[in-house]
Image (cartoon, grey):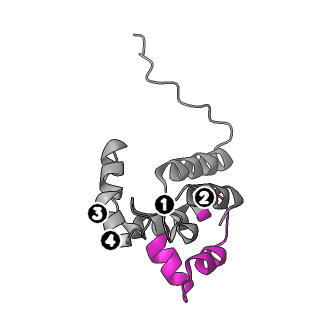
Amino acid sequence: MSQPAREALMAQRSGQTGAEAENLVFASRKGKPITPKNLLRRVLPPACRELNLPAIGWHSFRHTHATLLGEVGESLRTAQAILGHSDVKTTLNIYTHAIPESQNRAVAKAAGLVLPSVPEFQGVQKMEK
């Protein structure tokens, strides 16, 4: 876990109240644990609606994390270890996804290597008669 994420979670936990609050990062209004099922039903859908995002589940976070690890240049082995997969094929074939902007950037880089002297396309120009 990153240090900023840890600090944010510790700050969240320090604001909890109730008998078990000192052990909880997120607690119900009564200071009791929030179950993952209730969080998935009561918190995630409204947050997605508010942000105008499609509905997601817990595994969406794992897929996103694996994909972003690749985006920042981490190895598949590192992602495999973080996600706890026994086989790197699981990490590669199921949990990492191509990001369209990255694909476009890769194509442009490859084109620059193959055709370095071709100017960028500036749009359609009308031919004069």
- Asked which secondary structure carries label 2, the reply is helix
Q: In this view, does 77 lie above or below 108?
A: below
Q: Does 68 sit left or right of 39 as displayed?
A: right
- The residue pinned by badge 2 equals 14
| Marked residue nearer the N-terminal end (4 or 1) | 4
Q: Name the residue under label 3.
A: 41
Density class for disc 4 (Cα within 10 Å; few <14, some 14-19, many ≥20) is: few
Residue 105 appears anywhere in the view: yes
Q: Which of marks 3 and 1 is nearer the N terminus?
A: 3
The residue positioned 54% from the left and 87% from the top of the image is 87
For the record, the magenta segment spans 69-97
Residue type, numbered disc 2? Ser
| Residue 24 numbered tag | none
Tell me which numbered mark, 1 or 2, is placed earlier along the sequence: 2
Q: Do tag 4 and tag 3 residues touch (Cβ < 8 Å)? A: yes
Residue assigned mark 4: 37
Q: Considering the numbered disc 1 on the image, is that residue within a helix, a strand or a loop?
A: loop
Instruction: Indicate which disc, 4 or 2, sits on the residue closer to the N terminus.
Output: 2
The amino acid at mark 4 is Lys
**Residues marked 3 and 2 touching at CB (< 8 Å):** no
Label 4, label 3: how far apart the Cα atoms are = 6 Å
Amino acid beneath label 3: Arg
Is 52 within the magenta?
no
**Alpha-carbon distance for marks 3 and 1?**
29 Å
Q: Which residue is the site of mark 1?
A: 98
Asked if disc 4 and disc 2 are in contact, CB closer than 8 Å, the reply is no
